[in-house]
Image (tube, grey):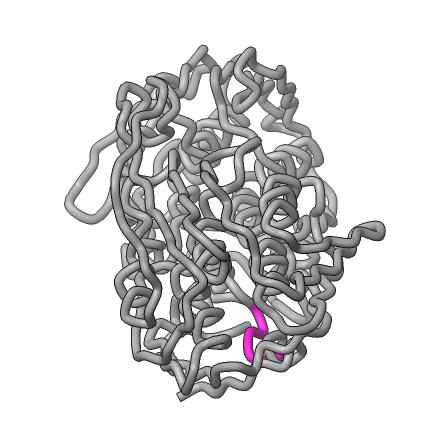
Amino acid sequence: MTTPGANVSIEVTGGTLRGGEVLVQGSKNAAQKVLPLTALVPAEYEIARVPDIADTHAIIDVLRHLGALVTYSDGTCLIDTRDLANQPVPRALTQPATGTFLFAGVLLARFGSSEVGLPGGDEIGARPVGLHLDLLRAVGTFADELEDSVTLRSPSLVGAPVKMPIPSTGALMSIVAAACLADGETVVERAPWDTDIEAAFVFLRMLGVGIACTAHADDRYVDVTITPRDRGATAGRIHFELPADRNDAATWVIAGALAREPVAIVGAPLSDLEPLIAVLESAGCTIAIEGSNATVTRPRELLSPVETVTVGASPLLHSDWAQVLSVALSQCRGTSRIVDTMYDARTSHLEPLARMGMTVRRGEVTVPRGTLMFDPGGERAASIEIDGPTALRSTRAATQDVRGSMALLLAGSIAAGHTRIDSLDQLRRGYEHLEARLGRLGVECRVL
């Protein structure tokens, strides 16, 4: 397993993004849900296609802290949670990744109480734990939020109807985890939906939890009914394989729009990528699809601009792709615009990209009320306009999130000179075997 913190910088040589073939990793976001859920039911688990990244490492550290036996080899995690002990999880263990906070709901369900440090992760805007606590209170939880942790306790969790005011995947998983061992059914209205949530639900069904989803009138949401498992039921050895990582796949698809030669992406979740594929095809890229593989070829002439790309939750182009996509848009002939309806502060990549020569303007646009995921009552969304084509130049920079750091790295791979990115720790959180996979596309880079 990759150990975070050993190095902090990566230097990339510009003009070396040639093309080639890259294999999509297992899903980071599905791992952040499924691995903590192994602590819910005492059993032996074999979880396959686990990405070798720092965020996964953080979850495993928490499992080991709680007394689980965990081994990792070649993408497979063997986890034994039969002798798990309920004890406080300090913030030093939860801070490296957002997914660690799921242990609060999992331990509450299994033991009746939990004390878990506040999560960390990307600095991309407001993602408070208050929503988690509000939903958990609805099923009989007493919750106290301290300076750097939360304490949860419940003499008896009781199923209840709850309605999500905003579509937080983390808060959804917290209430689902608690509902798995509650008394009676829980119905979560207006829950978000994506393939990583679906993977977590498939896993829970393997544990004997009943989960039914009904499409909402607004197709961004589902209503979820959770029927708790029998506390007395035993579980045998559970084998589960994580799905492909749509954010990882999207990164390499966008790389294909920047590379001099075609880029083949192997094992991609193509149905998830349809909005991105549509945007790149409108810009002039050719994308050939065969099974779960896609080959992206940029046009001989300049890419065409994209008037407006609205990003957010499914079925929109995912917000996680916007930062990396901005690099491709900087190579288009004309002005393109990105409007983010999911996060209010996912812009840390813009200042260093501007230093690299990107012409970018920040602004606001009016959107229909209820559109903004972080503020359903709001009507003003942040937008960025990008002029192109831009001849990028090297710089030294960093961002405090995974995708922003990858945007800088890909920009450096087509810029003049050598670009140093001082946020390798962020890249390691989301991309496994990064140098090797970049090398398969011809990119010359070295860890400093």
**Residue 367 location (% of width, % of height):** 35, 24
Foreground pick, 414 / 307: 307
**Residue 31 location (% of width, % of height):** 56, 51
Q: Main secondary structure of the magenta part?
A: helix
**Residue 54 location (% of width, % of height):** 46, 66
**Residue 290 location (% of width, % of height):** 84, 52
Q: Residue at x 70, y 57 (%)?
A: 48
Foreground pick, 383 / 370: 383
Tell me, yes or no, if residue 404 can be seen here: yes
Q: Residue at x 39, y 18 (%)?
A: 139
Image quadrant for the N terminus?
Answer: bottom right
Q: Is residue 219 left or right of residue 136?
A: right
Q: Is residue 369 magenta?
A: no
Foreground pick, 174 / 367: 367
Start-end of magenta stretch = 432-436
Is residue 406 positioned above or below 145 on the image? below
